[in-house]
Image (spheres, helix red, strand yellow):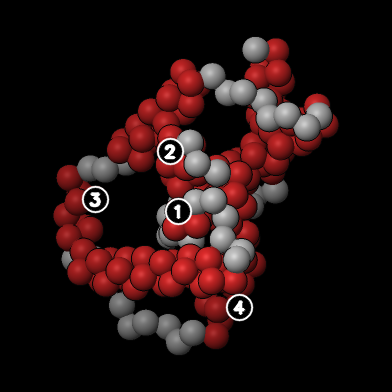
Amino acid sequence: MTSFLGVLAAATAGGLLLRLTGLQGGLAIGAMLGAAAFTLLRGDSAVPVPGYAQDAALIVLGAVIGAGITRNVLVDLKALLLPAIIASVAIILSGVAIALALRWFGAAPADDVLATSPGALSAVIAVAVDRGVAPAEVALFHLVRLLMVLGTLPLVVLLLPRTSS
């Protein structure tokens, strides 16, 4: 239990520190880095996170997402449903293709489909934790993707023509 409390303290410090930088997702990324630093400095074994803590984190994450869904949001989203479905299918298919390519090259992580699937960093990692399959590998793939998107997005926005809407 003492180790878990140390992980929580390190995660809190890392999250709050990275949040101060203004980096998108800084709180979650900093928390992961803080917890990882604590665990690595501690030794070679992972710090066990009690099941009740994992369950509570998933419930809070679900509540945060669900609390933002209002009738007005649903009305606004109605017009975007078809484009969202088309984009989702394309992204999911590309994720599956990437997972298959990684398998072919012998470089696939344990949960390759989840690691190459689209999704918010915290939500995808929560699914990996809930499934009990390779959350660190899934986190790495999505963290790298997130950092690359954030790093290249300003240039992409400058290069793409603006839409008329």
Circles 3, 1 touching at the beta carbon (< 8 Å): no
Q: Give the x, y percent position of residue 163.
A: 37, 82
Q: Quadrant of residue 78?
A: bottom left
- In the shown orientation, is residue 139 left or right of residue 162? right
Q: Which residue is mark 3?
A: 73
**Earlier residue among tags 3 and 1:** 3
SS label for mark 3: helix
**Closer to viewer: mark 2 or mark 3:** 2
Q: Which residue is mark 2?
A: 131
**Closer to viewer: mark 4 or mark 1:** 1
Say what amino acid the circle numbered 2 marks: Arg
Q: Which mark is residue 155?
A: 4
Circles 4, 2 touching at the beta carbon (< 8 Å): no
Q: Give the x, y percent position of residue 88.
A: 32, 66
| 35 and 50: which is toward the camera | 50
Say what amino acid the circle numbered 1 marks: Leu
Position of 44 relative to 23 (above/below): above
Circles 4, 1 touching at the beta carbon (< 8 Å): no
Position of 153 relative to 48 (above/below): below
Q: Disc 2 to disc 1, how far (Cα)?
A: 10 Å
Say what amino acid the circle numbered 3 marks: Val
Q: Disc 4 to disc 3, how far (Cα)?
A: 30 Å
SS label for mark 4: helix
Q: Which mark is residue 114?
A: 1
| 81 and 72: which is toward the camera | 81
Circles 2, 1 touching at the beta carbon (< 8 Å): yes
In the rendered image, which quarter contains the N terminus?
top right
- In this view of the protein, can residue 60 be seen by the observer? no
**Earlier residue among tags 2 and 1:** 1
